[in-house]
Amino acid sequence: MNAMLTSTHPVAHHVPLTTGLAAAAEARTQVRAIVRAWQVPVDAYVVALLTSELVTNAVRNEADPTVMLDVTCSSSRLRVDVHDTSHAMPAPADAPADAETGRGLIIVGALADEWGFYATPGGKAVYFTLAFQTGGSPK
């Protein structure tokens, strides 16, 4: 994972995650380590939270034994894509305030600078981006 963030070329890391109860925790661990190793000026807690939401959604709908986590970094933003084999495109739910599930994409939409999804040959990917923070060090 060693990379020079100052490079003008994007930096990328691809992580296959075994579907199951530990997938979201492993994804959080991986993105926090990437943010630290690359010294990305973003809030690692927010990256971990948003990644966890996307991975949890992917695992819930996944028949395949793995989902793919792709983390890329350009000169001004971090992007996280989560790939799965489901062809069902996501939509934010209108969940009641006391619901235990159903608000993940609302959280992603509120905290990410951008989020979306796209069809892939094997299913779909859901992504978010975070712009680099200015005036401070990475968290």
Image (tube, grey):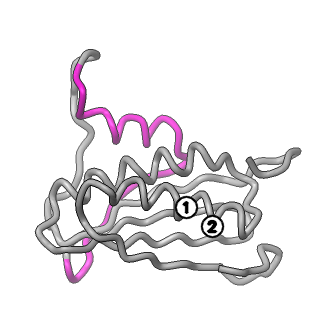
Q: Distance between the residues labelled 2 and 1?
A: 5 Å
Name the residue: 30% across, 33% down. Answer: 103
Question: Which quadrant would residue 129 be assigned to in this image?
Answer: bottom right
Q: Quadrant of the N terminus?
A: bottom right
Name the residue: 54% across, 78% down. Answer: 13
Name the residue: 71% across, 69% down. Answer: 37
Magenta-tinted stretch: 99-122
Q: What element carries label 1?
A: helix
Q: Name the residue under label 1.
A: 31
Contact? badges 2 and 1 (CB < 8 Å): yes
Question: Which quadrant would residue 22 be assigned to in this image?
Answer: bottom left
Foreground residue, 121 or 29?
29
- Using the image, tell me which numbered label, if any, was put on residue 132: none
User: Does residue 46 sit above or below 37 in this rendering?
Assistant: above
> Circle 2: is it few (<14), some (14-19), or many (20+) Cα within 10 Å?
many
Left or right of 48 in this view: 102: left
Q: Is mark 2 on a helix, strand or loop?
A: helix
Instruction: Check residue 114 for magenta coloring.
Output: yes
Foreground residue, 62 or 75?
62
- Using the image, tell me which numbered label, if any, was put on residue 34: 2
Residue 73 is situated, as x and y percent measured from the top left of the image, at 64, 70
Question: Which quadrant would residue 5 be assigned to in this image?
Answer: bottom right
Instruction: Check residue 127 for magenta coloring.
Output: no
